[in-house]
Amino acid sequence: MARNEIRPVLKLRSTAGTGFTYVTRKNRRNDPDRLSLRKFDPVAGRHVEFREER
């Protein structure tokens, strides 16, 4: 499977201000808007919202 711009690699940055990031991929056809997920931030020690950074 070829890697292309339909499923780009993106960074999810913590909104807690710790600077922690997750790296993931998403399908641009299904999710054209910015991705926002609630995940664990080990620096903050709790679950916070992570938003897509471009």
Image (spheres, rainbow, N blue to C red):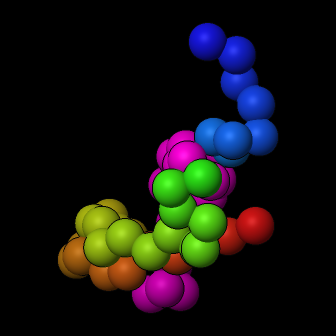
Extreme-top residue of the structure: 1
Residue ID at (76%, 31%): 4
Note whether residue 42 is visible: yes
Residue 46 vertical placement versus 16 (above, below): above
Q: Is residue 11 magenta?
A: yes
Residue ID at (55%, 47%): 27
| Count of numbered marks | 0
Residue 39 vertical placement versus 24 (above, below): below
Instruction: Give the extent of the magenta segment.
Output: 9-28
Residue ID at (32%, 80%): 48
Note whether residue 13 is visible: no
Q: Quadrant of residue 49?
A: bottom left
The answer to whether residue 44 is left or right of residue 52 is: left
Q: Quadrant of the N terminus?
A: top right
Residue ID at (51%, 69%): 35
Task: Please name whichever residue, 6 or 45, is drawn nearer the observer in this view of the structure.
Answer: 6
Task: Please name whichever residue, 52 or 3, is drawn nearer the observer in this view of the structure.
Answer: 3
Extreme-bottom residue of the structure: 16
Residue 2 vertical placement versus 10 (above, below): above
